[in-house]
Image (cartoon, rainbow, N blue to C red):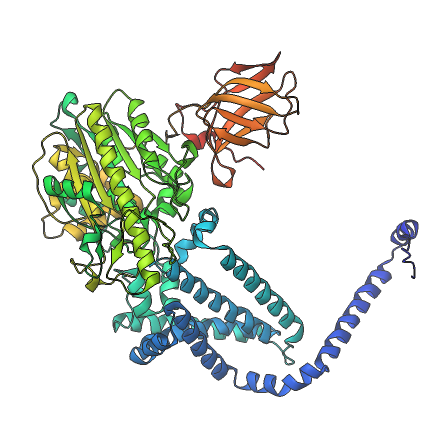
Amino acid sequence: MKKIQLKRPDIKGAFHRLKHLKKEDIAEYWRARKERRQRILEERRNSAFARRMQPVYRWMNRLSLLFHALLACLINFAIEAISRHSAIRAWEYMTETPLVFLYNAFMIFMTFSVVYLFKRRVFVRIIISVLWMVLGVCNGYMLIKRVTPFNAQDLKVATDAVSLINNYFNGFELVMVVVGIGAVTVWVVSMWRRGGQYNGKVHRIRALAGIAACAALYAVATDAAIDERVVSTYFGNIAFAYEDYGLPYCFMASVFNTGINEPNEYNEKSIARLSDNGSIVKSETGLKDSKKPNIIFVQLESYFDVAESEFFTTSKDASPNLRKMYENFSSGYFKVPSVGAGTANTEFEVLTGMNLRYFGPGEYPYKTVLKERQSESAASALSALGYGTHALHNNGGNFYSRAKVFDHIGFDSYTSKEFMNILQFTENGWAKDDILIQHIMESMDTTEQQDFVFCVSLQGHGDYPEEKVIENPEITVEGIEDEALKNRWEYYVNQVYGMDEFAGNLVKAVEERNEPSVIVFYGDHLPTLGLKAEDLKGRYLYNTNYVIWDNIGLKKEDRNIPAYQIMADVFERLDIHAGTVFNYHQGRRKTKDYLKDLELLQYDILYGKQYVYGDGEMPVKEPHMMMGVRDVTVTDVMEHLDGSTSLYGENFTGNSKVFVNEERQKSTFLNNTRIELPETNLKEGDTVSVIQMGSSNTVFRASNKYIYQEGKLVVQEGTGTDITKSWQEQAQPEEN
């Protein structure tokens, strides 16, 4: 076997050449490099592949505009076929609404105009085509997993979605995604080398003028399409809008049409008129402190009363506890802003009283305006009346930016899954809801006054498996012939049963407190199970169900109500008049210009000059929210002969991370009182702390620091998270 000999690098020679480097040598290097480049290009031009493609390239360049038009139509058809999961449905869309199809194709055509700025036109065409196809594939897959299509706001939650990847992708799907991305990448790179170049001169000024002309023509076409109602600027239902107006237009609308556009009549005078010269900013109640009830809102994930469905039956009532409440307390249909997804948007409407119809299509205010600035909410309104305010969710604190948003809208505390020892999960990996009860009670125990608790459940979350995953279901489903669909519904119905059990247990826990209380249960949206209006008794996809339980003798008043009015309605029943938007609903709900003026008010508060507050400021405390309501404490340490260490304490969770001398340690969570450190051997003087850490290594709450002295941990009081300040002021992401 021939030995491989490695040539020793000539370091000395290299330094010598560098020392005696001349200007002529540099010029010669670049000349030689240019010649080598020209030689490589010539070889590519004369390759067998290039020779075969030359006639094609010539015709593509001569008829490039026609080629771009045909390619745009093909791509548009392909992404619609993927999005609609059917080439037949895409064909129907194209033939039944040709103007919509051509308008969207024109948008794709416009993006191809940039190829004239480059010599590698084939490669640029491929890049643009791949980007459009990726958009179609993303949308198609999203619509398999949920009802809401892919939009620009999904890009803003992409980092959150990574933490839920196992809930949306099985192992095979993940492998296919990785293989697909790899294959496309390899092909695109190969086309960089093999795609050839335009041999003529690139006239970039002329190309830029052409691009500008194309953009101007598209703007004119857009105005005409809107005027002739070919497309619309308002999406009552984003899923239906994608079907009616096409993926390219709807996605781009979600990119550029965000927030609330300034209304034509927006000025100080109009705000003074609708606010009754500022009187709606008041905060008052006719209730004495002793009569103020605890107010608990519970948002049930993907919940609706399955008895509303008309195409299947269940072996027994899936909602016996809530059914009893429907019969004895105020209830009705609950109109929500989305179908199949969009939990945070229902939250937004409930907590702020604002109507999402005035925002851009696909907007999530949690990921945009509320992530960056403060706003009034039910939390700030009730805080002004002396309430303690708490939010809870058995999912990650960073998801939908809730930790930041809840801080910005006036909550005192937020308990996310990072502060819960969740032991029970659904068959597809979501936390069950019963865990929330103890944490609701703990939150209320931290204050002496009445409390407002906003709780978001998780158990009913999709995706709903097509195979039978519950061996002995409590409830079975009949009337559905398709086995996969039947399994999906049976899984969902049993999660509804679990949510109902949670609701019943929560009511019992509140009753045992023997305090005046009101609990509002409602569903945030219908599940992602392909429901159609004709499948439901109410014939409307935006209805879930709500009920207002109480132990203070409220009169039963059944009515249907939209999400953005529910808080104002409950406040009015309780003789509470607080929060600008809620006061507006109470006073103006039946007036002629109610919705029109609501848009003005929302714009003024979130995006305008806040005329409604006059010379004052928004009645919201500075961000002050704490994550969790219990401190993590370390009480003891034990060193083992194998070099590992055990920490003992209180309030540990699976998200408790141990740091020694500010360095994160490998650790194993055993239970709420013990954490194992398999590779840590403490030394005299070492500092130890425990941090409750969220996704992206976000520090939500830190324990006091402890110094290791003579085999014991000595607490350093005042070194942990300061509960008098906002967690955001103190949080610093840590490196793994």
Q: In which image quadrant can residue 74 be found? A: bottom left
Among the 4 quarters of the image, the one containing residue 586:
top left
Q: Can residue 59 be seen in the rendering of this structure?
A: yes
| Left or right, 386 with reference to 4 | left
Image quadrant holding the C terminus, namely: top right
Could you say where residue 300 lies in the image, as x and y percent from the top left? Answer: 28, 44
The total number of labels drawn is: 0
Q: Is residue 156 above or below residue 45?
A: above
498, 732: nearer the viewer: 498
**Residue 733 x %, y %:** 52, 36
In x, y percent, where is residue 141? 42, 62
Camera-side residue of 648 and 67: 648
Residue 233 against residue 611 in the figure, above or below: below
* The one of 649 and 249 positioned closer to us in this rendering: 649
* Image quarter hosting the N terminus: bottom right
Describe residue 297's horizontal placement relative to residue 166 as left or right.
left
